[in-house]
Image: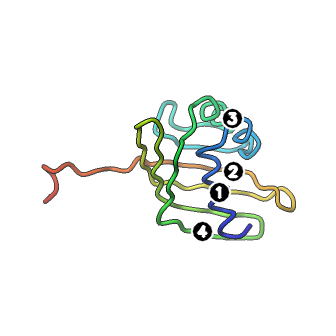
Amino acid sequence: MDDDRVWSFEKSLWTGGADHYRELVDNECLMALPQPPYVFTGRQAIEAVANTPRWANVEIDNGQIARPQEGLIVIAYTVKATKDGETYEAHCTSTYRRLAHEEWRVVQHQQTPRLVASAANKDV
């Protein structure tokens, strides 16, 4: 999968509907998300995310891609997602494995919400 397709694939996970999400996330996926129970197994993660409203706009910055072996892609990035006046920013990682030619599934995803320093702590 070339770099442009990797980012398109990842962005689609933030904006796509429940069926799209179920199609691209492996049943064996593990996710660490900033909400209870914090660590989700594949089926838990699929249902938790599939049943939430999707983001309308997603900006990915500082993206990095590693290909440690054939059929394995690891990415890291910062995301800013918005919908209906709500904004969510986080540092994320995802790992994809190839099942067959042009068939990829997410097997790991993690989100760490972006910390924003308050004005009072700006000089600390």
Which numbered disc, 2 or 4, marks the residue that appears first in the sequence? 4
Identify the residue under disc 4. 65
Numbered disc 4: secondary structure? strand
Which numbered disc, 1 or 2, marks the residue that appears first in the sequence? 1
Q: Which amino acid does the dot numbered 1 rest on?
A: Thr
**Residue 7 at what x, y percent from top left?**
62, 61
Which numbered disc, 4 or 3, marks the residue that appears first in the sequence? 3
With respect to residue 53, does 118 lie above or below? below
Identify the residue under disc 3. 18
Q: Which amino acid does the dot numbered 4 rest on?
A: Ile
Distance (Cα) linking label 1 and label 4 = 10 Å
Identify the residue under disc 1. 95
**Residue 105 at what x, y percent from top left?**
74, 51
Q: Which amino acid does the dot numbered 3 rest on?
A: Ala
Q: Which residue: 29% across, 50% down? A: 116
Identify the residue under disc 2. 106
Which numbered disc, 3 or 1, marks the residue that appears first in the sequence? 3
**Residue 85 at what x, y percent from top left?**
40, 37
Distance (Cα) linking label 2 and label 3 = 15 Å
Q: Around disc 1, counting alpha carbons within 10 Å, would you say few (fewer than 14), some (14 to 19), or many (20 or more)?
A: many
Q: Are marks 2 and 4 in contact (CB under 8 Å)?
A: no
Q: Are marks 2 and 3 in contact (CB under 8 Å)?
A: no
Disc ID at residue 8: none
With respect to residue 93, does 33 lie above or below? above
With respect to residue 2, does 93 lie above or below? above
